[in-house]
Image (cartoon, rainbow, N blue to C red):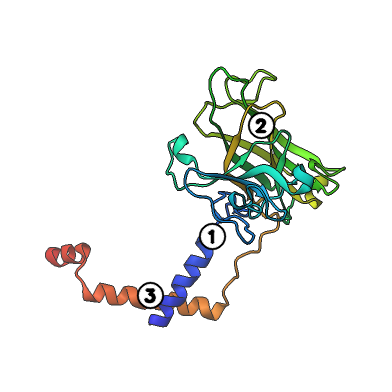
Amino acid sequence: MTRALGIWGALVAGLMCTTPVFGEQLLINGDFEAGPILRTGQGAVGQGQLKWTTTGSPGPWYSDSISGVVGWNYATPEWSGTHTDVGLARIDSSFGRPSSGQSLFNNRWDKLVSQTVNPNLRAGDVLTATVEFGTRGGSTDPGRAGYFYLVAGTVDPLNPERFAPGSIILDSLSVANPSWTRFVPDVLAAEYQYSLLRLDYTFAQNDPALAMPITVGMRLAGGSYGTAYWDNAQLTREFAPNPNPTPAPVPEPGTMLLAIAGLGAWGGRRINRQTWPFATFCRRVS
């Protein structure tokens, strides 16, 4: 009897229940909370600190630097190709968040920070990229601005500040704080607050971007007066409905009969073991 009920329960669950797939996070270290890439003599970022990137031999400020951000790529062209003013910061208390939080900072004009992934895409899939942008400045200074990109393609290996030839910008946004005047941004970001930026793209049939890697990038705009901070980057894929779903298996006749018989026997036992209101009513009438 127990076996019959188990088969019947499995049959009902298989026919009536499905688990939808909503999407997946594609980026590595999108929250920037992973420890930095370090060389001998370098250490983690302490609370209240900012540490830029130095990949050369020990020298001035070497011990106060890191050697890179896990999962993210950017060039280091200054100082004979060993240093750049991009790194990690623990200054979230300035934004009203726990002081232990870590973010990416960029204080170098036109410097592109990026990550490339290779998802297996198909027509109908939807990519959504988000990141938070923040600044710490005054209301009368020249301001800070940046760009956020969702690109089919990669970064140019010969010029890491640009996307490779043939890349397709799927979506992009500009962002700036209120004192910025060089252009009108798509998103206006208040000082000492993180502002959420969002990019979306839906892949069409025969879309050339389907066969390409996907790159998310952030850039500090030229002319920015000071540092921009980026946090909680995400790239999420929402799967397209399967055009040819696999049908639920049809149980064999013997299994179906066994399940029905088990259910009937179970119902009979329930009737015999308890008094139903209808049965009580019949006895009273007779």
* Residue with the mark numbered 1: 18
**Mark number, residue 264:** 3
CA gap between label 1 and label 2 equals 43 Å
Task: Classify residue 129 as left or right of residue 274.
Answer: right
For the residue pair 8 and 37, the one nearer the viewer reads as: 37
- Toward which corner of the image does residue 21 lie, by quadrant? bottom right
Distance, label 1 to label 3, CA atoms, is 27 Å
Q: Mark 1 Cα within 10 Å, few/some/many (few <14, many 20+)?
A: few
Q: Amino acid at mark 1?
A: Thr
Looking at the rendered image, the quarter that the N terminus falls into is: bottom left
Query: Local crowd at mark 2 within 10 Å, few (<14), some, or many (≥20)?
Result: many
What secondary structure is marked by label 1? loop
Q: Mark 1 and mark 3 in contact? Answer it, CB < 8 Å.
A: no
Residue corresponding to mark 2:
146
Is residue 204 visible in the rendered structure shown here?
no
Q: Which label's residue is closer to the chain start, 1 or 2?
A: 1
Amino acid type, label 3: Gly
Of the two numbered discs 1 and 3 in the rendering, the one whose residue sits closer to the viewer: 1
- Marks 1/2 in contact by CB < 8 Å: the verdict is no
| Image x and y of residue 164, in percent | 84, 44
